[in-house]
Image (cartoon, grey):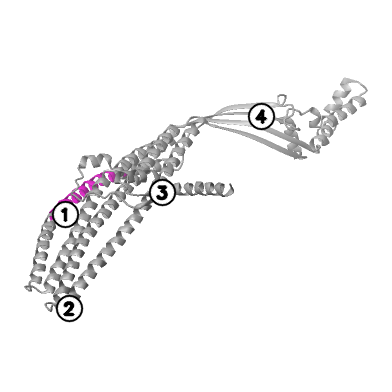
Amino acid sequence: MKKVLFLICFFFIASLFANESVAYEKLSLKDAQEIVKKDNLEINIAKFDKQVASLGEKIALGYSFGKLDAQMLGLRSNDAGNVFGFKLQSREATFGDFGFSEFLSGVGGAIGASGGDFASFANMMADPKMSGELLNTTPKDLNFPDDRNHFDFKLTYALPLYTGGKLSYYRDISKKMVKMGELDRQKVEALKMYEVRKTYYDISLLYQFESDLTKIRENIEKLKKSTTLLRDEGYARKTDLLEVEAKLSNVERMLFSSQTNRDLAYEFLSFLLNAEVKSIKKLPLNVVEHNVTLEDILVKNRDIQKAKLGLEIQSKMLLVSKASFKPEIGAFAEYGSSDDKFLNDFKEHDRYTIGVQAKLNILNGGIDSAKIEQEKVKRLKVKKQIELATKGITLLYDKINTEIKNLDKQIDSIKKEIELMDEIYLSYQERYKEGLASINDVVIKQSLQIEKLLKLVELQNSRNEKVSQIFKLAY
C-alpha cells in the first residue's frame, strides 16, 4: 500500500513539473506570436511600466481630494510656558495658575492695614511703593509649576479650492502618460513580433538550404561511387577521387554549419517565447508582399504617435507654468482635544479651527516667466521632432521598398542561374563518365552551383528581413 501511495505521489509531482516546462512542437507562426504577447519577458516588463503610469494617474487625482491627517502627541514637562500652554489648550487654566494667590494675599494685607476704610485702602494702593511691591511679586505658581502630562489628539484636513488649473492639468498629463506607457508596451510587442517573424523565416530558409545541400551531397556521393568504379577500372586517377571527397567534405561542413545555426535560431525563438520550442511549421518561401501603405504607417507608427502625445503633454506643461501667475486658494479645518490623561473627557476639552488661505505670486525674480518661455521652446522642439520623424519614416519606407524591388530582380535572376547551373553540372557529370571532361571541371561546376545556392539564400533572407521591417514600421 505504501508503495502504491508513493508511486501516485511521484507521478503527481512529475506531472506538475511537466506542466511547468512546456515544449512546443510544430508550432505555427500565429500561435507563436500569441504566446509571445502573453509570456515574453520584455513585454511583461513593459506592462509593469504601464501599471506604474496608471498608479501615477491615481496619485494625480488624489491631490484634488485634499489631505486628512490624524496626530497624537504625548508630552510631560515642568517648563512654565509649556505647562501654562498645556492647561490653556485643555481648557483647565485657573486664576491660580497666573499667581493670583500671592497677589491677593498682598491686597488682603493692604485691606487689613487700612482697617477696613476704603478711602485709606485706595490711598495705599495708589502709593507707587505699595503698587510696585504688588506688581513686582514673582508668582511661584506661574513660574515654578508642578510637572504635567499632556496628551493632544487632532484631525487636520487641508483642501485645495483653486490652484490656477494646475491639478486638472496634472491629471490630464498623468492620463496621457498612461497612453504613453501603452504605446511603449505596443512598441516592444511589435519588436518581438518582428523578431519572431524573422526567426521563423530564418529557420524555414535554413531548412530549405539544408534540403538543397542534401540533394547536392547525394549527387556528389553518386559521383564518388562513379569515380571509384572508374578508378578501379583504370579510367580515373586517385586525385580525381580525392577532389570529389574534398568537395563532399565541404558540403557536409556547410550542412553542419547550417544545422548549428538552425539550433541557435531555435534557442532564440525559445527565449522570445519564454518556453522551449522543438519544431515549427515551416513558412513558404514564396515572395511575400507586405501590402502596407505609407498612409497606414504614418497613422499607426508608434514613434509618431508618441511624438504627438508628447506635444500634447508639453502643451499642458505650458499651461502649468502659466498657472503660477494665478492665485491659489485653500481651505483648512482642524478638530482636536487635549488633557493630562489619555483621551480623558474628550468632548469637554475639544476644540476646532477653520480657515481659508489665498496666495498670489507677486515677484519671483523672473523665474516663472523664464519657465514659460522654456516650456514654449520645448513645445516647439517636439513639433520639429514630429516633422522630422514623419519625413524620416517616409524616406525609410521608400528606401526599403526600393531595396525589395532590387532584391526581387536579383532573386529572379539567381534562380535562373541556378537552374542553368544544375543542367550544366549534370551535363559535366555525364561527360566525365564518358571521359570528355576532367573531374576538376565537374567539381568547379559543383562549386559554382553551391555558390549560386548560397547567394540565393542570402538574397531571400535579405528580402524577408526588408518585408519584416515594413511590418515593423507600421506598428
- Residue type (three-letter) at the residue carrying disc 3: Val
- Distance from the alpha carbon under mark 4 to that under mark 3: 62 Å
Q: Are marks 4 and 2 in contact (CB under 8 Å)?
A: no
- Distance from the alpha carbon under mark 4 to that under mark 1: 81 Å
Residue 361 in view here: no
- Distance from the alpha carbon under mark 2 to that under mark 3: 53 Å
Kind of element beneath mark 4 = strand
Q: Label 4 belongs to which residue?
A: 336
Mark 3 nearby-residue class (10 Å; few <14, some 14–19, many ≥20): few
Residue 190 is drawn in which quadrant?
A: top left
Mark 2 nearby-residue class (10 Å; few <14, some 14–19, many ≥20): few
Kind of element beneath mark 2 = helix
- Residue type (three-letter) at the residue carrying disc 4: Gly
Q: Label 1 belongs to which residue?
A: 407
- Residue type (three-letter) at the residue carrying disc 1: Leu
- Distance from the alpha carbon under mark 3 to that under mark 1: 39 Å
Residue 304 is drawn in which quadrant?
A: top left
Q: Label 3 belongs to which residue?
A: 22
**What residue is drawn where x is 39% and y is 43%?**
38
Residue 346 colored magenta?
Answer: no
Q: Earlier in the sequence, mark 4 or mark 1?
A: 4
